[in-house]
Image: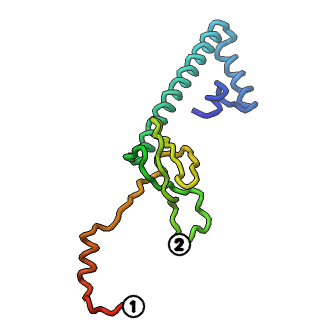
Amino acid sequence: MSPYRVLYEKTHHLPIEIEHKAYWAIKKLNLSLDDVGKSQLLQLHELQELKNEAYKNSIIYKAKMKNFHNKALRKRNLHENQKVWLYNSHLKLFPGKLKSRWNCPYVITEIFDSGAVLIIDPKTGHAFKVNGQQLKPYLEAEPPLAIVSLIFQDIPKDHPQI
């Protein structure tokens, strides 16, 4: 159906079409008021059916789009007092080849049911809400002592210092 028909509840006609349709209607119905009333009532019911169908189709479309969008989202396992990186979406103009888009670690103070997360900057103490999809866990990993000791064991004692 055309958008004009949905919006104005009638089909769009040019003035010439209206004149010919009016002539056709007069000739066909012979100005019988009962037939005209029945025809008009039938058209009103048809219009209501078209509206209902368009409404149902829009609900189906919205549900499909929601499912499509939700498939792309990744579930994050975040918890309170966890350090996270915040994605900087404003860094688009000439970011530099090696410049990171993730800002310094923040601390999660509260997680909401809607997916929003309240984070705080430990340096300034400024707290704000962000979308949970803009966060990723901050991993504080130090090299294991066993690996560090193996690296230093391979160096000979008489190796000259640089």
Q: Residues within 10 Å of mark 1 (few under 14, many from 20)?
A: few
Write down the residue under mark 2: 97
Q: Residue at x 27, y 92 (%)?
A: 158
Give the mark nearest the N terminus, 2 or 1: 2
Colour mapping: rainbow
Q: Nearer the viewer, mark 2 or mark 1?
A: 1
- Mark 2 residue type: Lys
Residue 143, percent across and down? 32, 68
Q: From the viewer's perspective, is 137 left or right of 7?
A: left
Residue 162 disc label? 1
Q: From the viewer's perspective, is 14 left or right of 64?
A: right
Q: Quadrant of the N terminus?
A: top right
- Mark 1 residue type: Ile
Residue 93 disc label? none
Q: Quadrant of the C terminus?
A: bottom left
**Dot 2: element:** loop
Q: Quadrant of residue 13?
A: top right
- From the viewer's perspective, is residue 42 above or below residue 73? above
- From the viewer's perspective, is residue 110 above or below residue 154? above
Q: From the viewer's perspective, is 114 left or right of 153?
A: right
Q: CA distance from mark 2 to mark 1?
A: 32 Å
Q: Are marks 2 and 1 in contact (CB under 8 Å)?
A: no
**Dot 1: element:** loop
Q: Residue at x 51, y 71 (%)?
A: 98
